[in-house]
Image (cartoon, helix red, strand yellow):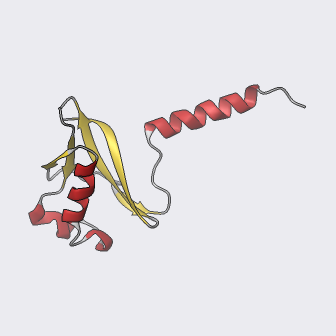
């Protein structure tokens, strides 16, 4: 699977990055397998795998179990990391603002 998409699951100020792949129809989403989910997830996600699966499938993804689904920075609190599109938008907005004539 080629990681080209990230779903961000948010719960208050906490978040989980879910690796997804394009090139499959329907698209795939990688989650930790049932047997290790509670061992590797933070407290707020323990016992909630079924809930996460339901949310992911509502976006049209098929869940595939992958022990390497988590990478450094896969979950945290506060603002989640910017996605590629958000970084591009910020660069565009910053550039646009710098091109505006001064009043």
Which quadrant does the N terminus fall into? top left
- Kindly identify the residue that appears in the image at 32 percent across and 72 percent down: 44
Q: Decide if residue 84 is on the left or right side of residue 62.
A: right
Q: Where in the figure is residue 10, as x and y percent of width and height?
A: 40, 60
Q: Where in the figure is residue 4, as x and y percent of width and height?
A: 31, 34
Q: Decide if residue 97 is on the left or right side of residue 35.
A: right
State the count of labels.
0
Q: Decide if residue 89 is on the left or right side of residue 77.
A: right
- Kindly identify the residue that appears in the image at 50 percent across and 57 percent down: 79
Q: Nearer the viewer, residue 69 or 96?
A: 96
Q: Where in the figure is residue 63, as x and y percent of width and height?
A: 16, 49
Q: Nearer the viewer, residue 43 or 49?
A: 49
Q: Where in the figure is residue 93, as x and y percent of width and height?
A: 64, 34
The image shows residue 62, relative to residue 54, as above or below, that is: above
- Kindly identify the residue that appears in the image at 18 percent across and 32 percent down: 24
Q: Decide if residue 73 is on the left or right side of residue 30.
A: right
- Furthest-right residue in this view: 103
Which quadrant does the C terminus fall into? top right
- Furthest-left residue in this view: 35
- Kindly identify the residue that appears in the image at 52 percent across and 33 percent down: 88
The image shows residue 102, relative to residue 29, as above or below, that is: above
The image shows residue 76, relative to residue 64, as above or below, that is: below
Q: Quadrant of residue 20?
A: top left
């Amino acid at each position: 699977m080629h990681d080209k998409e990230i779903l961000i699951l948010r719960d208050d100020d906490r978040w989980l990055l879910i690796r997804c792949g394009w090139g499959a129809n329907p698209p795939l989403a990688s989650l930790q397998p049932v047997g290790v989910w509670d061992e590797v997830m933070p407290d707020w996600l323990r016992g909630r795998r079924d809930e996460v699966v339901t949310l992911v499938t509502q976006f049209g993804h098929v869940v595939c179990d992958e022990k390497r689904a988590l990478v450094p920075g896969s979950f945290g609190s506060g603002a989640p990391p910017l996605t590629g599109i958000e970084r591009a938008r910020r660069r565009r907005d910053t550039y646009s603002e710098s091109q505006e004539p001064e009043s």
